[in-house]
Image (cartoon, rainbow, N blue to C red):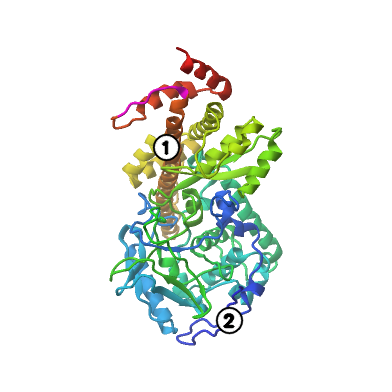
Amino acid sequence: MEVSLQSSARAAVHAAPQRATRKSARDSTTAQASLSSLSCTALAGAGSRSLFPALSPPRVRASSRRTRRGVISAVAAGVAGAASSNKTRLARAVELAQWLASAGFPAQPVAPADAGAAGIGLSAKEPIKKGQVALRVPENFVVTSVDVADHPVVAKAAEGRGDLVGLTLWLMWERAQGDASLWAPYIRTFPEATSSPLLWPADDRQRLLAGTTIAGEIDGRVAEMEAVYNVLKAAHFDADPGTFATSPASAPFSLESFKKAFAVVLSRAVYLPSVDLFALIPLVDLVNHSPAPSNPAIPPPSSFDFDPASQCVTLRTPVDLASGDPLLASYGQDRTPADLLLTYGFVPRASPSDFILLPVSLVPGDPLLEFKRQILNDQGLSVSEMFPLFTDRFPRQLIAFMRLARLQDAAQLAGISFERDVMLSEANEYEALQILLRDCNDRIAEFPQTLEDDLRLLNLGPSVATSAAAAAAAANTGSSSSSGGGGFGGFFGGFGGGQQQQQEEAREAERASAAAAAEAVAAGERELLAAALRAREKQILANTVTALRTKLAPIRGLPSKQGMDDPNEEIKAMFGMMEAGLSAPTKIFSDLLKRKNSP
């Protein structure tokens, strides 16, 4: 049943924002196009799958877990450059809450609070019972495509471009108004930008993300973002430069401003499934992240959504909260660490729910292809699939798919099971597992750095990361100095040109120094974020390799030690040489089988 956002007038208290009568969500929500795909399935490179829940629009979910972000949370707070102190950020959040209250916002059982290394969040002001509404935002305080469509300046440019691009244009305009914006208290709580790789320099994207699951797509995402801007500039901005200033780079509607605003919207927008749109929602975007629980005993998280009865966006807590407890949420139960980095600009703390996606497919030209396709169709699968690999497990269906893919005996098709772990034959099992093993090893080999390198960098922290970034920048430019050796000469060369010129040059030198320092901090953040992502993905792949080797051991006829700290250590050592250059799994299996069965 479709739910429409109903007409609502904003409270006219202390110049609170006014809004014209709303259209229905169905009429006002434009088709998601181009950049809107960046926030959902396209970021993870995955479409809808029946085996694994679709990685479709991010739904912020309440969580009972008490952890947030990652080992690098202090430097991965989603702010490019020097971050505001918690004290300043908390003051802005409190100012926002006061402004909302003055405009008729209902009293909430939660309030902004200092969350330490996690930044600023929301915590309970009083005990909140399980199932009780912990946060309720009236519809007239929610910014959606309806507001964009009604906007007197950006509506035409946003028309037909999807929720996220429309909200980006709205944010750019409101930012340009500064304190004169009716939304100024809310806008001030936004960072200038995020730490998403969408905003990283091209050299850093290529160097730091090499081997990761987003290495092959990040440049395309950036190009897509820039292409949308170029269309907007040609069709709208250039036609009215007085309204849409596009230069210099700091101008309100420059490419740089568009990219930063889009990254902020991407990180702040919440998807409301009942009305099928994205929205910017005051206070909701202060709820901090916690990984989704993997323990089935933990209550399932609930979602933010629009409640037609109360005309509010609501969130109910799945657990009891005591006074002072943080209100946390999962930013997406079915989002990979890479997806979270692209969307929100941080890598979450390691969790059993972390996963990467492994693409697999049937062999083209297989004489049994149509029979296999029918078997997969009956399971709701296709001939090409993406299966998750977790830190401590992988789905039974992945092994079943690979058994089917390598099966050559039609008589064994009836033995395929996607519900039970049933081996068809040792030869088929060996080949299916060996191909998976080779794929995982190949992916590990694509990383220039070792897992130990990344863990060492994360343990040493921001200062070492900043030094590593500086060394990489020097290597790229062929110089260890960003000034090219002309800094002091340029300053003193103007000494005789008058005191005014000297002062201006001194101020310019100070600005350049401040900019260089900010960039050094941002570069260090990028180093740590990338190291955290690489370490997470490599750990998942390494654990999968160990699991596959263990599963292969009985077939290969090799012993494994028992009663040791690592019962797989002997398997690792014995398989290392064997897996190098392995290209004919079936033939090698036959040789091993002969050796295994010989007297």
Residue at 48% across, 71% down: 281
* Residue drawn where x is 44% and y is 70% of the image: 315
The percent position of residue 397, horizontal first and vertical second, equals 53, 43
Q: Tell me if residue 559 is in the magenta stretch.
A: yes
Asked which secondary structure carries label 2, the reply is loop
Q: Nearer the viewer, residue 322 or 475?
A: 322
Above/below status of 375 relative to 348: above
Can residue 214 be seen?
no
Q: Which residue is mark 2?
A: 6
Q: CA distance from mark 1 to mark 2?
A: 51 Å
Whole-percent x, y for residue 279 in the image: 54, 69
User: Please, is residue 524 above or below residue 15 in the view?
Assistant: above
User: Which amino acid type corresponds to the residue marked 1 in the rendered image?
Assistant: Asn
Instruction: Look at mark 1 in the image and give the residue it sits on.
Output: 543
Give, as a three-letter code, the residue at label 2. Gln
Residue 256, quarter of the rendered image: bottom right
Highlighted range, magenta = 556-562
